[in-house]
């Protein structure tokens, strides 16, 4: 806590006068849009990092600028755990800090904002702990409320398995390597040939596994038919799986108009190197609450969701 | 080819294959790339002691685990392909350094002290893979490997 206050005290010294983060006020439970401007120009990796109340840091936005640029359009998720924003560049050099708590103290909350905060506070995203496996083809809502139905959905529906190809490659590699290693080579030339074969096999096996083993991004969406948190939900949600450009989308809904569902539970798995367009997971203007803030990465002109962790989140269209 | 040798080598691969199978059962949590390196280096060292191999044969045992390390980099450490290639090359370079220095120190029969030093050095390399910038760390590994190889050549062991 002392470190947190020390950082706030040091804010004027860390922040550079020529760096600005325009577009505020930045509010929780939304995807905030901002323009990050630096009059001296920015290049390389630029990040917006959130500082929580316990002083831990969480990356919220990242982009890699290949040419010197004076401004970047950034967007990032915020929740009430994040008390400050920090802009970094290069290897984490802080160039700007914004104390969100101080900024929000000066704001008068509207009734709409207060209602949205209350509603999102009540929707705690379920923590995902499900091992891999096959997701069921249907999910029956058994009269529980929205929160409980979310927990049940996350623990039974958000399942997937890594691709089997690299494991099969490793199995084949093990058999061939064991065969080669067990060959008796009495001559020096024979030993050299055996060692050469093993080295080629290791290099080939490693390259194949790296190429085939990459996880693919996956987006789960569970569209709930009712909006009231206390309402008893019933019905059967059917699974629909789509292979889209670079990622897989698994949707559970009562019918095919899941985009119209007022409340959705989403699960996002988008490790580095994969792509999952933000606009596909989070409709514009929706309120959202994640189990852990995802990092939004700007690649070209497209915002991608990214993160080393599987995150779950509630997406609420009701307030908008 | 002797059936015993084949069986021994097949048994050697059972443990890493079980590790691969565990990926299907564990929840998705990122594993630091250095931790996987240390586990595989420790396993290669233990297997080399059990199989009574040293020198180049031990280096080959270590190398045979590299595809499994590649798997852990992309599936457990969730590195992008370029990042995984750099980490794999670092692991190969620094693994070769460790094995070369160990071979320069003790050529045949490892002792408890040499094993402990090998594991400690593996842990240091693992920390380097996890926390240091990939390209300078790989460069440093290749530079140290050059000196270590020179040492081997000077002693007529290359």
Image (spheres, coloured by chain):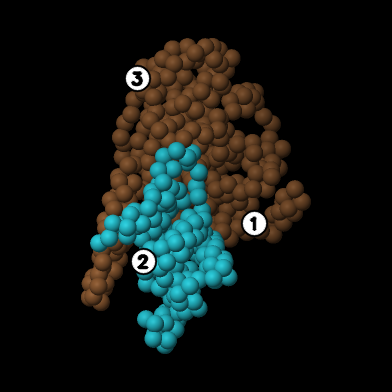
Chain colours: A brown, B cyan
Q: Quadrant of residue A12?
A: bottom right
N-terminal-most mark, 1 or 3: 1
Observer-side mark, 1 or 3, equals 3
Q: Chain of mark 1?
A: A
Residue A256 tag number: 3
Residue at 38%, 30% (x, y): give it: A134
Mark 1 on the same chain as mark 2: no
Mark 1 on the same chain as mark 3: yes
Observer-side mark, 3 or 2, equals 2
* Residue B137 image position (x, y, % from top left): 48, 68
- Looking at the image, can residue A146 be seen? yes
Q: Which residue is mark 2?
A: B60
| Mark 1 in CB contact with mark 3 (< 8 angstroms) | no
Which element type, helix, strand or loop, lies under badge 2?
helix
A252 and A194: which one is in front?
A: A194
Q: Which residue is mark 1?
A: A15
* Residue B155 image position (x, y, % from top left): 42, 86
Cα distance in 3D space between marks 3 and 2: 55 Å
Cα distance in 3D space between marks 1 and 3: 49 Å
Residue at 44%, 22% (x, y): give it: A223
């Amino acid at each position: 806590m002392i470190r947190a206050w020390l950082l706030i005290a040091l804010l004027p010294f860390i922040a550079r006068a020529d760096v600005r983060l325009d577009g505020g006020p930045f509010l929780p439970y939304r995807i905030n849009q901002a323009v990050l401007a630096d009059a001296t120009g920015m290049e390389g990796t630029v990040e917006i990092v959130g500082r929580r109340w316990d002083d831990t840091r969480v990356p919220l936005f990242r982009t890699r600028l290949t040419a010197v640029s004076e401004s970047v359009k950034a967007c990032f998720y915020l929740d009430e755990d994040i008390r400050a924003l920090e802009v970094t560049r290069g290897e984490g050099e802080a160039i700007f800090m914004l104390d969100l708590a101080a900024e929000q103290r000066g704001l008068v909350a509207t009734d709409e904002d207060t209602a949205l905060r209350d509603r999102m506070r009540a929707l705690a995203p379920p923590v995902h702990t499900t091992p891999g496996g096959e997701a069921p083809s249907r999910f029956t809502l058994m009269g529980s409320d929205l929160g409980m139905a979310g927990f049940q959905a996350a623990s039974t529906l958000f399942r997937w398995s890594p691709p089997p190809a690299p494991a099969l490659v490793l199995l084949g590699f093990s058999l061939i390597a064991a065969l080669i290693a067990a060959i008796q080579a009495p001559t020096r030339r024979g030993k050299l040939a055996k060692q050469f074969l093993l080295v080629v096999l290791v290099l080939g096996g490693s390259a194949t596994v790296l190429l085939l083993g990459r996880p693919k991004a996956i987006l789960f969406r569970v569209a709930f038919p009712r909006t009231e948190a206390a309402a008893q939900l019933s019905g059967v949600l059917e699974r629909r799986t789509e292979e889209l450009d670079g990622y897989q989308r698994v949707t559970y809904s009562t019918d095919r108009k899941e985009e119209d569902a007022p409340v959705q539970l989403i699960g996002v798995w988008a490790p580095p190197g994969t792509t999952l367009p933000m606009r596909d997971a989070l409709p514009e203007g929706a309120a959202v609450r994640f189990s852990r803030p995802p990092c939004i990465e700007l690649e070209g002109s497209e915002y991608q969701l990214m993160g080393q962790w599987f995150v779950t989140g509630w997406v609420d269209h009701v307030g908008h | 080819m002797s059936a015993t040798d084949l069986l021994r080598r097949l048994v050697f691969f059972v443990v890493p294959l079980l590790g691969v199978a565990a990926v299907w059962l564990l929840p998705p949590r990122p594993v630091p790339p250095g931790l996987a390196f240390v586990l595989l280096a420790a396993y290669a060292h233990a297997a080399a002691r059990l199989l009574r191999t040293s020198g180049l044969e031990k280096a080959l045992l270590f190398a045979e685990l590299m595809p499994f390390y590649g798997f852990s980099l992309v599936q457990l450490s969730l590195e992008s392909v370029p990042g995984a290639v750099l980490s794999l090359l670092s692991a190969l370079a620094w693994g070769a350094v460790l094995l070369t220095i160990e071979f320069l120190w003790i050529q045949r029969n490892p002792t408890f002290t040499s094993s402990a030093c090998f594991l400690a050095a593996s842990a240091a390399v693992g920390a380097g893979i996890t926390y240091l910038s990939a390209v300078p760390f790989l460069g440093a590994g290749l530079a140290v490997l050059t000196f270590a190889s020179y040492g081997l050549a000077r002693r007529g062991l290359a």
